[in-house]
Amino acid sequence: MAFGNCARLDTLVTVVDAFNFFLDYASLEKLLNRDLTEDQNDSRTIVNLLTEQIEFADVIILNKTDLVTSADVEFIESLLKQLKPAAKIYRTSFGCIDNVSILNTGLLITLHHHLRQAG
């Protein structure tokens, strides 16, 4: 059965760990070092992966905001907005978010429509 016959992808969501954000964003560590890839030729760093996930997301869940200062949350959120201005950002603790914020949003469909119009 094809994926399109049983589900519809309409939102790309990524979760950003506010507590570990500064450690990961400044890391030069490779994905291979953390066993985050099986491809021995994958030379990406943790920050490369983090940045890619943010740039492709329609919705960003900024999680563990209860474990950092409000100034840190504001700073991280401003950086996320610079990396992906159009993304919706939700602050959460324990990953708790209303399903309406991440399901059936139509955000990915809207993106594909705009990409077709631009080309």
Image (cartoon, rainbow, N blue to C red):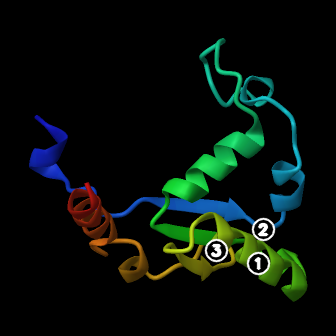
Residue 100 falls in image quadrant: bottom left
Q: Viewer-proximal residue, 90 or 75? A: 75
Cα–Cα gap, marks 2 and 3: 14 Å
Label 2: which secondary element: loop
Question: Which residue is farthest front?
Answer: 119
Q: Badges 1 and 2: C-beta atoms under 8 Å apart?
A: yes
Amino acid carrying mark 2 in the image: Ala
Q: Which of the numbered marks, if any, corresponds to residue 65?
A: 1
Residue 46 image offset from top left, x and y in percent: 75, 40
Which SS class for mark 1? helix
Task: Decide if residue 56 is on the left or right side of residue 76.
Answer: left
Q: Which mark is residue 81?
A: 3
Q: Is residue 37 visible?
A: yes
Is residue 118 rendered to the left or right of residue 60?
A: left
Which disc number belongs to residue 30? none
With respect to residue 31, does 27 lie above or below? Answer: below
Return the residue at label 2.
18
Q: Alpha carbon of mark 3 to alpha carbon of mark 1: how far?
A: 16 Å
* Amino acid tagged 1: Thr
Q: Specify the quadrant that holds the N terminus.
A: top left
**Which residue is rendered at x = 88% and y = 49% of the image?**
26
Q: Nearer the viewer, residue 104 or 82?
A: 82
**Picture coordinates of residue 50, whole percent (x, y):** 68, 49
Q: Secondary structure at mark 3?
A: helix
Q: Nearer the viewer, mark 3 or mark 1?
A: 3
Amino acid type, residue under disc 3 in the picture: Lys
Vertical placement of residue 107 versus 112, above or below: below
Please tell me which residue is depicted at 55% across the width and 59% down the height of the picture.
14
Mark closest to the chain's N terminus, 3 or 1: 1
